């Protein structure tokens, strides 16, 4: 029973800790090479979904495809913005733009080839997805299972009530 309480305490602490983390000031490039300070998304009035992914990550591609299917509806309903952060390295980054264009993804894609943002946000594995609101990470999850996008929009809707 003590182990259970210890686990629950750890879980609650990690959730509270996740909610208090600020967005790091890391400069990334978009698909056109334009430099963007990632912390600029902290000033958004609406929630922002940040999804770390890679071209070689099957679950990442499935998650982003599932979100893409409902993204227009999400934007109309909540105003949420999605930032897809590719962690492809210098060797594989050349595959990102053709893949994004081929999939028809209509959201912002940033390139984290040096993994600066990945390290700053303590991302261990991809896919890693976070909901950011007013500069704070308020929700995060790793891995992908079908239907997880429903939890994402639930979190977003709870923030804009």
Image (cartoon, grey):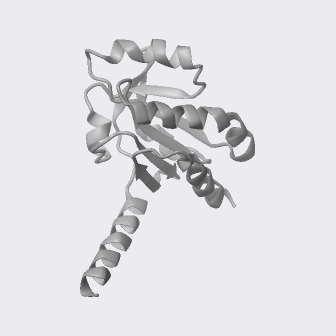
Identified at 26% across, 15% down, the residue is 91
Residue placed most toward the observer, 119 or 73: 73
Q: Which of 41 and 130 is in front in this view?
A: 130
Q: In which quarter of the image is the C terminus?
A: bottom right
* Closer-to-camera residue (57/128): 57
Residue occupying the point 49% across, 34% down: 62
The residue at 59%/19% (across/down) is 104
Residue 65: where, in percent of width, then height?
55, 31
Please state the total of marks drawn on the protein image: 0
Q: In this view, does 43 lie above or below 35?
A: below
Q: Tell me if I can see residue 107 in this picture.
A: yes
Q: Is residue 37 visible?
A: no
Query: Residue 118 placed where, x, y %?
Result: 30, 39
Asked if residue 2 is positioned above or below residue 8 in the image, the reply reads: below
Res 72 quadrant in image: top right
Residue 20 drawn at (x, y percent):
40, 61
Q: Which quarter of the figure is the N terminus placed in?
A: bottom left
Q: Where residue 18 appears, x then y in whole percent?
A: 38, 60
Is 60 above or below relative to 121? above
The single residue placed furthest to the front in the displayed view is 146
Q: Is residue 102 above or below residue 57?
A: above
Q: In this view, does 79 lie to the left or right of 60?
A: right
Q: Residue at x 53, y 49 (%)?
A: 148
């Amino acid at each position: 029973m003590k182990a259970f309480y210890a686990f629950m305490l750890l879980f609650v602490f990690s959730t509270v800790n996740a909610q208090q983390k600020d967005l790091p000031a890391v400069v990334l490039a978009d698909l056109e090479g334009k430099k963007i300070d990632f912390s600029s998304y902290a000033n958004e009035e609406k929630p922002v979904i940040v999804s770390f992914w890679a071209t070689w990550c099957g679950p990442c591609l499935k998650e982003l495809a599932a979100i893409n299917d409902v993204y227009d509806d999400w934007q109309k309903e909540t105003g949420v913005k999605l930032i897809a952060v590719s962690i492809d390295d210098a060797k594989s980054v050349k595959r990102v733009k053709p893949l994004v264009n081929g999939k028809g993804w209509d959201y912002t894609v940033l390139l984290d080839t040096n993994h600066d943002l990945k390290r700053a946000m303590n991302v261990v594995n991809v896919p890693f997805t976070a909901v950011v609101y007013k500069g704070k990470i308020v929700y995060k999850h790793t891995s992908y299972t079908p239907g997880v996008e429903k939890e994402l929009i639930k979190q977003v809707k709870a923030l804009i009530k």
